[in-house]
């Protein structure tokens, strides 16, 4: 009899809780079932002090990945260097074209029968289409370097995509070629932008040897920065045009020496497509 009485009492308590439905805190503003706000926003008090560090939802927002982490995550689409065998190196020149430094670099490459890769700024291409044509006609490779040399992670999605698309279109009009490589200005890019670039069949190509020529170094310094770090498979960053007041005479002055020393070491100078081509 005692067991039956306890069971009856428990059933009564459970039924009372179901009927009331109001044992918990009441919301001051109902949300549609399944809505975003209903899932994440608590607008009633639980009677407990707030969490000093903030809610889990706010504090645990995914942090932006570093460039090193992005390279690891997108290893096949975010390139820093080529294979170490055969013995090849890719010389690359950013920010082109202009009518002063780019022309001198092209003259030297032609004189020494060397090939390189030029990353083109769209509005500069439109201003100097004849030089873009010359780059292609003399057998060099080209890549996208944005339309205005913007710092891409600071742009809205639309502005970022326009930087890429407008450069693709400008160079296609001038050369008839579609570019398949992109180097983001300053090497800066974020996760979302990489995903979009991959969807557009564009590979990101940065570098593993920095000449630091953008600092206005002399030829000896540029040469030392390259030759002290280069190895087979390296992608070498240099600049073939500058910003206002930038002096790239060191780049031009070092180029002949760099070409000769690399060749004496048995290294072939190739374009990015050649360096990354499957064996």
Image (cartoon, rainbow, N blue to C red):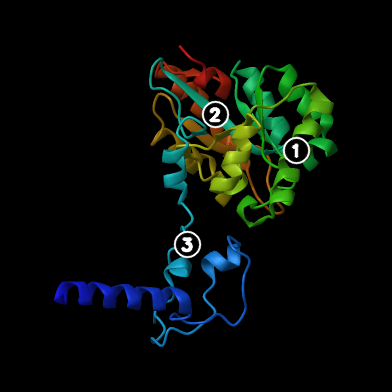
- How far, Cα to Cα, is label 3 from label 1? 31 Å
Q: Residue at x 72, y 21 (%)?
A: 136
Label 3 sits on a secondary structure element that is loop
Q: Residue at x 63, y 33 (%)?
A: 199
Q: Which of pointers 2 and 3 indicates the residue nearer the eye?
A: 3
Looking at the image, residue 228 sits to the left or right of residue 242; the answer is: left
Of residue 258 and residue 180, the one placed in the foreground of this image is 180
Of residue 192 and residue 170, the one placed in the foreground of this image is 192
Task: Answer few, some or many: residues within 10 Å of disc 2's Cα (few below 14, many 20 plus, some between 14 and 19).
Answer: many
Is residue 252 visible in this depiction of the protein? no
Label 1 sits on a secondary structure element that is helix
Q: Residue at x 47, y 82 (%)?
A: 25
* Residue reaching furthest to the left: 2
Q: Which of pointers 3 and 1 indicates the residue nearer the eye?
A: 3
Residue 180 location in percent, x, y? 64, 27
What residue would you read off at disc 3? 61
The quarter of the displayed image where residue 5 is located: bottom left
Residue 141 location in percent, x, y? 65, 23
Mark 2 or mark 3: whose residue is earlier in sequence: 3
Of residue 62 and residue 95, the one placed in the foreground of this image is 62
Where 174 sits versus 184, above or below? above
Give the label on residue 165, or none. 1
Residue 14 location in percent, x, y? 35, 73
Looking at the image, residue 29 sits to the left or right of residue 60; the answer is: right
- How far, Cα to Cα, is label 1 from label 2? 25 Å
């Amino acid at each position: 009899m005692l067991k039956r009485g306890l069971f009856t009492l428990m059933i009564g308590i459970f039924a009372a809780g179901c009927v009331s439905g109001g044992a918990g805190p009441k919301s001051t503003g109902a949300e549609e079932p399944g809505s975003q706000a209903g899932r994440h926003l608590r607008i009633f008090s639980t009677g407990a002090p707030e969490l000093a560090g903030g809610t889990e939802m706010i504090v645990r927002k995914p942090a932006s990945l570093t460039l090193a982490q992005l390279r690891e995550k997108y290893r096949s689409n975010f390139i820093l260097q080529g294979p170490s065998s055969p013995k090849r190196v890719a010389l690359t020149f950013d920010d082109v074209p202009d009518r002063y430094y780019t022309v001198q670099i092209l003259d030297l490459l032609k004189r020494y029968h060397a090939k390189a890769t030029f990353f083109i700024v769209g509005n500069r291409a439109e201003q100097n289409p004849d030089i873009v044509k010359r780059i292609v006609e003399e057998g060099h490779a080209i890549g996208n370097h944005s339309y205005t040399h913007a710092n891409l992670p600071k742009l809205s999605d639309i502005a970022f995509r326009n930087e890429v698309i407008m450069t693709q279109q400008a160079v296609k009009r001038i050369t008839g070629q579609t570019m398949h490589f992109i180097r983001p200005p300053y090497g800066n890019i974020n996760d979302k932008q990489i995903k979009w670039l991959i969807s557009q069949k564009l590979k990101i190509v940065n570098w593993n040897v920095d000449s630091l020529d953008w600092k206005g170094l002399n030829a000896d310094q540029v040469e030392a920065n390259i030759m002290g770090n280069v190895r087979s498979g390296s992608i070498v960053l240099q600049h073939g045009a500058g910003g206002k007041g930038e002096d790239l005479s060191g780049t031009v002055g070092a180029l002949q020496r760099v070409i000769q020393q690399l060749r004496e070491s048995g290294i072939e100078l190739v374009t990015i497509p050649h360096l990354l081509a499957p064996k």
